[in-house]
Image (cartoon, rainbow, N blue to C red):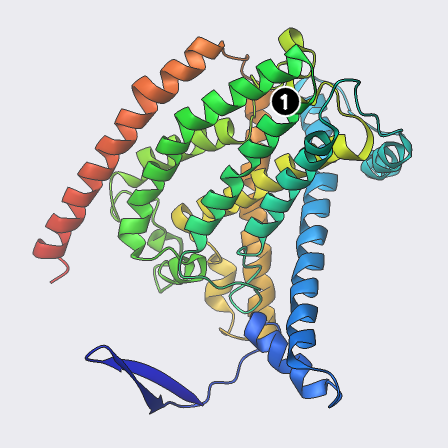
Amino acid sequence: MIDSVAINGTQVAEPVAEVAKPLGSGTNAINELLLSVRPDFVPDWAVSLTTALLAFLVAILVVSVCALIGTWGERKVSGHIQCRYGPMRVGWHGVLQPIADGVKLLLKEDLTPLGADAVLFKFAPALVLGALMGAMAVFPLSPGFFFADLDLGVFIIIALTSLTTIGVLMAGWSSNSKWSLYGAMREAAQVVAYEIPLGVSLLVPLMVAGTFNLIEASAGQSGGLGIFNWYIWPWVNPFMLPAFVLFFIAVLAENKRAPFDLPESESELVSGFLTEYSGIRWSFFFMEEYAAMFLLSVVGAVFFFGGFNSPLTEVLPEGTFLWQAACAATLIAKGAFGVFFMMWIRWTLPRLRIDQVMTMGYKYLTPLALLCVLLAAVWEAVAESLWRN
């Protein structure tokens, strides 16, 4: 295997040791596997296209599973919080209820309102879901199974999930409904207010981790101290916990979750930007919402709560299949807990007014996030000069 190094700006080939990659260790490994078994008449571009198709199918599977489990979990969590059972009839404790709902949505007529811009109206749900699926490509299921191990991983996730706002604006404007347009304008204002504290609060763990890569950030929290190596603890950086609180509040607003669900706001705007949608296109927006909740919960788990690391992964032999499975189960469990906490908040807190939402974002969260980054940077500089040397 030949690698290259830069000497005075020039790339020079350098022989390095061949490293065996586990099956499924990213797009390159999948390409190599497909190249090894393909017939001679199959061109290289067909192999790359097959790899991209596999990544697309995995993303669809993850998004669909997030939507199925999320809708069922939402109903059960809200039911128990309100001292009732939630769905119980379709399957054991209603576990098949999301499938029944999905079949119902598929069979519903797909309507386009009179006077609506048909092209934009139909394209908006696809843009919302497609942007989220693109972000899902960066999601590593385990250290040895991923499709896109990018150096700017978390940056790509934040950038692509922000594109969903364009889809919401498109949906609201093209629906030819004042309720839809009001909801879309609220979404635009809300995202502008909360994208800044969301990104700025993430700078604190990024400074500590020294990387945007999700797998590298998770690996930096492994070691003999176990969970005490996680970035959330004050002895790592005392401004991590405030940064996580700001990050989590911004994630709620980013995903239009209560108490920040002003873009939908059923009591005021019918269903907001979703008012004129029905059937499968309506479901695309909810698939995106639950998958984004899970994805951003995973980002929070990676940069604050140890990522793949848990007491179980510390005792298993690293690199084995069992260790990879434990890493995947750990990250999924942490992401699921983040989604559960969002649901808990939804059924606990009342909806804020739009002026309160804007005030919180601009007047409190953004200055606090900037202050948190400044103090965290000072702490890192002092710690580097006094203790880490």
Give the vertical position of 217 relative to 350 (above or below): below
Image quarter in which the C terminus is found: bottom left
Report x, y in % for residue 211: 34, 57
Relative depth, front residue between 357 and 160: 160
Q: Say which quarter of the image contains residue 238.
A: top left
Observer able to see residue 70: no
Residue at (55, 12) in percent of width and height: 350
Give x and y (percent) for residue 218.
42, 58
With respect to residue 95, does 8 lie above or below?
below
Question: In which quadrant of the rendered view does residue 323 lie?
Answer: bottom right
x then y, percent, for residue 231: 34, 49
Secondary element under disc 1, as helix, strand or loop, is helix
Which image quadrant for residue 379?
A: top left
Can residue 86 be seen from the camera position used here?
yes
Q: Residue at x 52, y 61 (%)?
A: 312
Looking at numbered disc 1 in the image, what kind of residue is underneath it? Answer: Gly
Q: Residues within 10 Å of mark 1 (few under 14, many from 20)?
A: many
Q: Is residue 172 shown left or right of residue 96?
A: left
Numbered-mark total: 1
Q: Residue at x 52, y 70 (%)?
A: 316
The residue depicted at 73 percent of the width and 34 percent of the height is: 122
Instruction: State the residue position of label 1.
Output: 172
Give the camera-side residue of 222 and 375. 375
Screen quadrant of the N terminus: bottom left
Q: Residue lying furthest left in this view?
A: 386
Above or below residue 13? Residue 78 is above
**Residue 7 shown left or right of residue 104 in the figure:** left
From the viewer's perspective, tell me whether residue 118 is left or right of residue 362: right
